[in-house]
Amino acid sequence: MRIIVLGPPGVGKGTYTQELVKELGLIHISTGDIFRENIKNKTLLGKQVEGYLASGKLVPDEITTEIIKNRLNQKDCKKGFIIDGYPRTLAQAESLEKIVKIDLVLNFKADKEIIISRLSGRRVCKNCKWIYHIINIPPKKEGKCDRCPGELFHRPDDMPETISRRLETYEKETAPLIDYYKHKKILKEVTVNEEFGKYKEIIMDRILKVISN
């Protein structure tokens, strides 16, 4: 199965995708992770996108699409995948159609105040990229990952001063994708206002039922 996940920053796409990857045996493709890894390694791509991510702006379509195309051409993607963070514009969606056929688009929804809380409290492992939340999904030991020896950090694009700009950018440039995929009749919506740490089974059951129906 080839799936795209949509939803505003902080809705929990990364967390739900991590669980779906385990449940369905699919490959997780995250443009955000690819960008951050390149920034960390100070590659040419990293230098190109660092300014965009820090300011809450979208990386230009041509750069992101080329990254996705290269990733989808790798052998491990043949058994199926979940794309998180792409497409973010109609131009990207149209470009993706020329690369691969998508079976399903999941659109995750949550109230704005809940999204802001999730973003400001999110922490990510520097090593394995596992996502935590200081309230909803805290690590067993503060500042340390449960899965590996990695340290947790607060991403620059999750800082409070950047959150409003990110949400505004999403509404302006990405939300039209919802109508685009509705028209193609492959979009399904899932409301996820609950705290994942307390309601994991309920949320995952809801998502899996949406996928199977």
Image: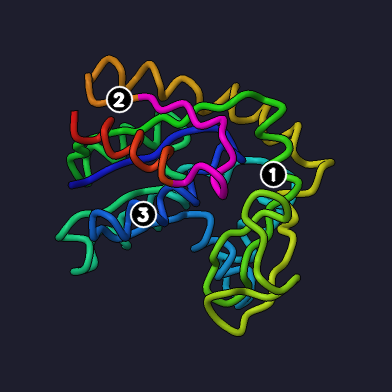
Label count reads 3
Q: Earlier in the sequence, mark 1 or mark 3?
A: 3
Find residue 163 and report its horizontal and vertical position in percent. 74, 38
Residue type, numbered disc 1: Leu
Q: CA distance from mark 1 to mark 2?
A: 25 Å
Q: Earlier in the sequence, mark 3 or mark 2?
A: 3
Image height of 108 relative to 39, above or below: above
Image height of 49 relative to 4, above or below: below
Q: Is residue 193 magenta?
A: yes
For label 2, the crowd category at 10 Å Cα-Cα, with few meaning under 14, some 14 to 19 and many 20 or more, is many
Find residue 135 and report its horizontal and vertical position in percent. 72, 51
Residue type, numbered disc 3: Ile
Check disc 2 and report the residue beneath it.
187
Residue at image position (17%, 40%) is: 101
Tag 1, which secondary structure?
A: helix
Image height of 107 relative to 176, above or below: below
Residue at image position (54%, 67%) is: 129
